[in-house]
């Protein structure tokens, strides 16, 4: 559930939370495992600290208008 002032793309937002290890998309990747696991070669980039997830968190979820 997205709280007031929380971007839907934030790691806790309606869309972003789906990519967490216990979310709909992230959970499926966890079940598949291997490179898609949250610590795998692909999956590690999709968490809030990873290259993809971090960029979304910084630039979209936090409202950075520089990009």
Image: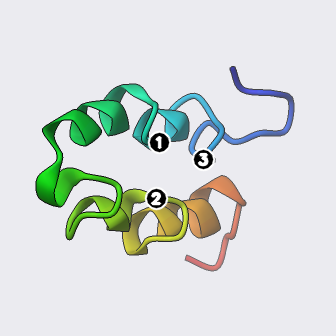
Q: Nearer the viewer, residue 18 or 6?
A: 18
Are the two marked residues, 1 and 3, in contact with CB atoms closer than 8 angstroms?
yes
Q: Is residue 67 left or right of residue 13?
A: left
Are the two marked residues, 1 and 2, in contact with CB atoms closer than 8 angstroms?
yes
Residue farthest toward the bottom in the current orientation of the protein: 66
Q: Callout 2 environment at 10 Å: few (<14), some (14 to 19), or many (20+)?
A: many
> Disc 1 versus disc 2: distance between alpha carbons?
7 Å
Q: Nearer the viewer, residue 57 or 44?
A: 44
Q: Quadrant of the C terminus?
A: bottom right
Q: Estimate the x, y position of residue 19 in percent, counting from the top left.
A: 42, 41
The residue carrying mark 1 is 20
Question: Which numbered disc, 1 or 3, marks the residue that appears first in the sequence?
Answer: 3
The secondary structure type at the circle numbered 2 is: loop
Q: Is residue 38 left or right of residue 20?
A: left
> What residue appears at the point 23 percent right and 40 percent down from the top-left corner?
29
Question: Which numbered disc, 1 or 2, marks the residue that appears first in the sequence?
Answer: 1
The secondary structure type at the circle numbered 1 is: loop
Q: Estimate the x, y position of residue 61 in percent, counting from the top left.
A: 64, 54
Q: Callout 3 environment at 10 Å: few (<14), some (14 to 19), or many (20+)?
A: many
> What residue appears at the point 15 percent right and 60 percent down from the top-left corner?
35
Are the two marked residues, 3 and 2, in contact with CB atoms closer than 8 angstroms?
yes
The secondary structure type at the circle numbered 3 is: loop
The residue carrying mark 2 is 47
Q: Estimate the x, y position of residue 49 in percent, counting from the top left.
A: 53, 70
On residue 11, which mark appears?
3
Q: Nearer the viewer, residue 60 or 27?
A: 27
> What residue appears at the point 84 percent right and 38 percent down from the top-left corner?
5
> Disc 1 versus disc 3: distance between alpha carbons?
7 Å
Question: Relative to 11, is 55 above or below?
Answer: below
Question: Relative to 36, is 48 above or below?
Answer: below
Question: Which numbered disc, 3 or 2, marks the residue that appears first in the sequence?
Answer: 3
Q: Which picture quadrant has residue 14?
A: top right
């Amino acid at each position: 559930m997205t709280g007031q002032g929380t971007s839907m793309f934030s790691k806790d937002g309606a869309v972003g939370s789906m990519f967490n290890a216990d979310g709909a998309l992230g959970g499926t990747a966890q079940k598949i495992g291997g490179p898609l696991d949250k610590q795998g070669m692909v999956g590690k980039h999709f968490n809030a600290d990873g290259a993809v997830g971090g960029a979304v968190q910084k630039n979209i979820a936090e409202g950075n208008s520089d990009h």
